[in-house]
Image: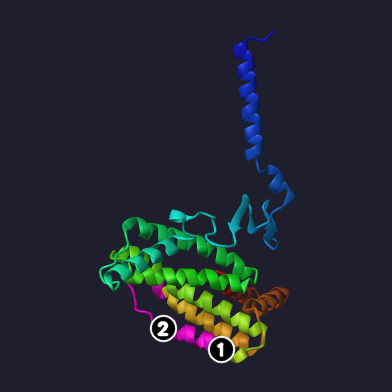
Amino acid sequence: MPSTHAKLLTYTIIQYYIEDMDRDISVLLADWDYDPDNSTRMINAVDGRLVLQVRRPLGIEQFELSGRPDGKLPGGHTTALEAVEGRLRAYTEEMGSDEGFELESGEVKELRDEGILFYYRYIVLFQMNQFTRVIDDTEHNLRLCNVLRNYCTGEDDRNSVLQFEPYIIRMHATARAMMHVEVEHIDLAETVINNAIEQIEGLEPIESPAFQFERVRSVNYLRSVMEQVHRRNPNPLEDLKRELELAVEHEDYERAAELRDRIRDLSS
């Protein structure tokens, strides 16, 4: 008969094997082959909540659709931003104004990291035409920008996020405009786009090449969206994709390369 030590060793090996089986996602990956044209889905989790999944070449990402994309509750709050805004309200009530309020170094990092998570989610949602959710997520990041602009004393920390504000504004405005177009409120869509262009052009410049690039690209993007709105196309990418197909069909590869660049810019 095997010794007690041998039995224990066998039990431990089996236990580790079972745990490895639980961690192995090969079955999930095999059930959903990677296809760049079919890489997103919304499913009901075990408890019934709706979650967003993205199939990547080497795995699957899962996003919560309410609150933070990672589902965490910083300090018991829905988001790190809400935690900071709560502290700001308490400070203002006690002091009579927000004068002297400053973000702590840990809060700055939490806000920056949280903004990136929301960015990852709203990019996918935009590609899925989930414009209401895109509006919510970009509103979060615009509020985050305002908090950093007003209460972050470190210029580098502040600008590490604010350099992307033009991009956030244009994604927010595009999602709002697309919702108006879907219900044939073309005039409202045009107003949203024009206001966003003015807002981007009116941003206080910061010393960042990324800011300059994003400001120019975002204004050009919104002008392209405006052209599509005039033509009543609710998705500014569709015409470009059709033009790309024709260019390839006619072997106009220079034009095709140009269109691919424009599609990539509009999708990023």
Image location (x, y in percent) of residue 60: 63, 52
Give residue 201's mark. 2
Asked if residue 141 can be seen in this view, the reply is yes
Mark 1 Cα-neighbour bin, 10 Å: few <14, some 14–19, many ≥20: many
Tell me if 88 is positioned left or right of 168 in this view: left
Residue 156 falls within the magenta-colored stretch: no
User: Residue 44 vs residue 150: left or right?
Assistant: right
Q: Position of residue 150 (x, y in %)?
A: 33, 71
| Amino acid bearing label 2 | Glu
Q: Are marks 2 and 1 in contact (CB under 8 Å)?
A: no
Most extreme residue toward the front is: 94
Q: Residue at x 40, y 66 (%)?
A: 85
How far apart are the two marked residues, 2 and 1, measured between alpha carbons?
17 Å
Which residue carries the number 1 mark?
190
Q: Secondary structure at mark 1?
A: helix
Three-letter code, disc 1: Glu
Q: Residue at x 36, y 68 (%)?
A: 89
Task: Residue 74: name its quadrant.
Answer: bottom left
Q: Magenta region, mostly helix, strand or loop?
A: helix
Q: Farthest top residue?
A: 1
Q: Please state, as top left, top right, bottom left or bottom right, where the N terminus lies in the image.
A: top right
- Region in magenta: 191-212
